[in-house]
Amino acid sequence: VQLQASGGGLVQAGGSLRLSCAASETIINIMAVDWYRQAPGNRREFVAQITPGGSTNYAESVKGRFTISRDNAKNTVYLQMNSLTPEDTAVYYCNTFTFWGQGTQVTVSS
């Protein structure tokens, strides 16, 4: 399975971005998909997960601001990010099982 993450960019604090994770195979629709992020000098950390049934789980730091969703018809998982802060600046990666996307850079300016 190949994962293609996109949607990152530069945004001011308080702004929004929507990340996409497009999969090469429909099998992703029966797998849990996670978003992780890694800021410079930090470990990669969990951000959000969505199960095949649509259940979601979030890191405490993003609860109430980020929303993960999936469109099975497009083999794509999204991460809607609102009320962004400079602390959200990182490379964001999508993951399912042992497969990782290439990452997309999110930079939030103050």
Image (cartoon, rainbow, N blue to C red):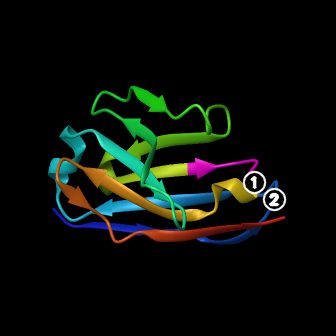
The one of 40 and 32 positioned closer to us in this rendering:
40
Question: Mark 2 highlights which residue?
Answer: 13
Would residue 1 appear left or right of 58 to someone viewing this image? left
The amino acid type, in three-letter code, at marker 1 is: Thr
Task: Give percent across and percent down for residue 80.
Answer: 59, 49
| 62 lies above or below 1 | above
Instruction: Tell me what residue is drawn at x 37 percent, y 30 percent.
Output: 54
| 52 lies above or below 80 | above
Marks 2 and 1, how far apart at CA: 5 Å
Would residue 33 appear left or right of 18 to someone viewing this image? left
How would you rate the neighbour count of disc 1 (Cα within 10 Å): few for under 14, some for 14-19, many for 20 or more?
A: some
Would residue 80 appear left or right of 69 to someone viewing this image? right
How would you rate the neighbour count of disc 2 (Cα within 10 Å): few for under 14, some for 14-19, many for 20 or more?
A: some
Which is more N-terminal, label 1 or label 2?
A: 2
Task: Give percent across and percent down for residue 58.
Answer: 50, 33
Q: Residue 47: say if magenta.
A: no
The one of 88 and 48 positioned closer to us in this rendering:
88
Instruction: Tell me what residue is drawn at x 17 percent, y 59 percent.
Output: 25
Q: Badges 2 and 1: C-beta atoms under 8 Å apart? A: yes
Task: Give percent across and percent down for residue 98.
Answer: 17, 53
Span colored in magenta: 80-85
Task: Give percent across and percent down for residue 94.
Answer: 36, 56
Query: What mark, if any, has residue 85 been given in the picture?
Result: 1
Q: Secondary structure at mark 2?
A: loop
| Chief SS of the magenta region | loop
